[in-house]
Amino acid sequence: MARVVVLDYGSGNLRSAERALQRVGADVEVTSDHRAALEADGLVVPGVGAYAACMAGLNEVKGGVIIGRRLAGGRPVLGICVGMQILFERGIEHGVESDGCGEWPGTVERLDAPIVPHMGWNTVRTPEGSALFAGLPADTRYYFVHSYGVRKWELDDTGPLRAPLVAWAEHGGDEFVAAVENGPLWATQFHPEKSGDAGAHLLENWLRTLN
């Protein structure tokens, strides 16, 4: 049974994520303990609320260090919602710019849509060869609730290494990054733990990648 830590840094639907992972067969611990987070087979970084507040909480438990050390060793990390957004270089909310973890270049900014927040079920345009979305039909809907997102993918994908797989979604005519698969680092803007059977299937796909 895969051992998964849901990182507790004062933000996110911790118990919802815990229950969803248990549902698909993971041995789950919700904790901010540094050693447990480093040694787990998989680490889930949830997040709800303001970008700056999430980064402050993450820094308090040295979450960026944990994520970086895990990725340096090829250990899987899954970011969810703001837990995905903080993986990018920066976030801008209400004119305030905050530094993120910097695992990917890019800016989290307010969606340019007539109605914000983007709340409810939506489809995702998935990349060819995706392991995260394997076995899920193209018209599958996932649950979103957010006002901010990454509207431009800025990473140079022309190098010798395998380029990240990026999924996109659209709300009110505005496109944004819905998910990323980049080696051991995966992330979703939507909430798998709130996406019913589709979300459970997606979490099972992630669990299959754990050592």
Image: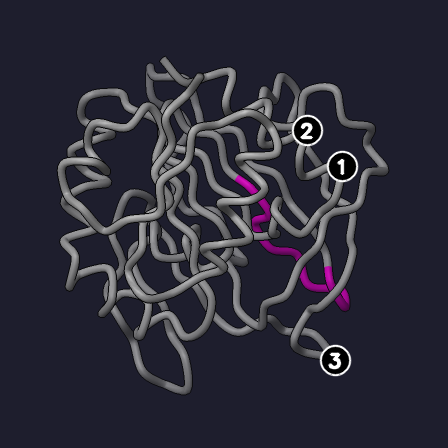
| Mark identifier at residue 80 | none
User: Looking at this view, is 198 or 174 the one in front?
Assistant: 198
Vertical order, 138 against 17 (above or below)? above
Which residue, as the protein is rendered here, is positioned at the far bottom? Answer: 94
Kind of element beneath mark 1 = helix
Question: Residue 154: x, y in percent?
Answer: 41, 47
Residue 103, image quadrant: top left
Which class describes the residues within 10 Å of circle 1: few (<14), some (14-19), or many (20+)?
few
CB under 8 Å between discs 1 and 2: yes
In the picture, measured across the screen, residue 100 lies left or right of residue 42, that is left
Vertical order, 84 against 139 (above or below)? below
Q: Nearer the viewer, mark 3 or mark 1?
A: 1
Q: Main secondary structure of the magenta part?
A: strand
Residue at horizontal 22 percent and vertical 30 percent from the top: 70
**Residue highlighted by disc 1:** 197
**Residue highlighted by disc 3:** 114
What span is colored magenta in the figure?
A: 171-179
Tell me, yes or no, whether the highlighted magenta stretch contains residue 117: no
CB under 8 Å between discs 3 and 2: no
Vertical order, 25 against 28 (above or below)? above
User: Looking at this view, is 63 or 111 the one in front?
Assistant: 63
**Residue highlighted by disc 2:** 201
Q: Quadrant of the C terminus?
A: top left
Residue at horizontal 31 percent and vertical 73 percent from the top: 52
Which class describes the residues within 10 Å of circle 3: few (<14), some (14-19), or many (20+)?
few
Q: Quadrant of the N terminus?
A: top left
